Image: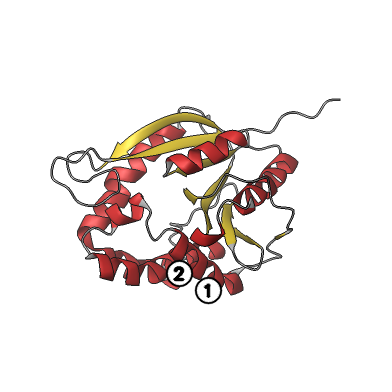
Amino acid sequence: MFTVVGHRSPISDRAVTASDGPCLQRVSKATAVLAEAFRKNPYFAYVLSSLKAPQRQAYLPRYFKALLTAAALNHAAIDEIDSWKSCGVLMPPDSDVANPRTILQAGLISMLWNVRLGGCRIMFLEYTPLAEACKAKTLRDGEKFFYVFFLGTLEDKRGRGLASALVRHHQDIARQAGLPIWLEATTEESVRLYLKLGFVVVGDFMLGVGKAGKDGIRKAGGEGLKIWGMVWRPTPLAS
């Protein structure tokens, strides 16, 4: 879904620590990393714009905990590198964070209550239809794919190749399955990183036009914030 990454240095030689079976036990550490990594992200500023800045920052850990719990309950892989300096959440084919069977257990209902009506409208009536339309441009109806739900690096640890190593790990998983990877990137920096790793931009869409600036903060007449849909497809192995 979202990425906050660094791209300036060679790929890290540190090994990715991959999920081994159910990863609910990884949710707490992943929450801490991603809440910090996305602290200044335009999308979250916009979707939580009904909250004042201090409230928004304080609420991010609860927001991520609910989403990551839902992901873990639906068979996501939560992988990390360099002792939780960076982590990624990869959803397998045919999995859904909004699975009705896990919504209550994950705490999504209380999370949606706290983001209020405005945040729910942004997530479900603005973001989701646009993201699905963008995805439909490249993924055939019924085509299976992996989905990068989140990938983020602590701000002071960026530029070391940690995110790149995680992406390559995800690509190895998808390559073994012979399936593409889909994601939505929320910053120009993350777009550049993914382009270098073989992803292509298949489309983009705007959120909050006339209501928010490119930083996601509410602004009357604002230009809005851009989201990029990107896909990576494995190269067929030579016979």
Is 172 or 120 nearer to us in this picture? 172
Q: Looking at the picture, tell me which residue is in the foreground, 50 or 237.
A: 50
2 or 1: tag closer to the N-terminus? 1
- The part of the image, by quadrant, that contains residue 19 is bottom right
Drawn side of residue 79 relative to residue 220, left or right: right
Q: Is residue 131 visible?
A: yes
Asked if residue 211 lies left or right of residue 232, the reply is left
- The residue wearing badge 1 is 28
22 left or right of 140 in image: right
- Amino acid of disc 2: Lys
Which residue appears farthest toward the top when viewing the image?
Answer: 239
Sort mark 1 into few (<14), some (14-19) or many (20+) by Cα contacts within 10 Å: some
Residue drawn at the location 49% of the way across and 53% of the way down: 96
Q: Residue at x 49, y 30 (%)?
A: 201
Query: Splitting the image into 4 quarters, where does residue 181 fall?
Result: top right
Q: Is 185 on the left or on the right of 8, as rendered?
A: left
Q: x and y percent of residue 211 in the render? A: 18, 45
Residue 154 appears in the figure? no
Residue visible at 58% across and 60% down in the picture: 86
Q: In the rendered structure, which amino acid carries the disc numbered 1?
A: Ser
Q: Which quarter of the rendered picture does the C terminus lie within? A: top right
Q: Position of residue 162 (x, y in %)?
A: 63, 54
Tell me which residue sits at (65%, 38%) in the image.
179
Q: Which residue is mark 2?
A: 65
Element under disc 2:
helix
| Numbered disc 1: secondary structure | helix
Q: Residues within 10 Å of mark 2 (few under 14, many from 20)?
A: many
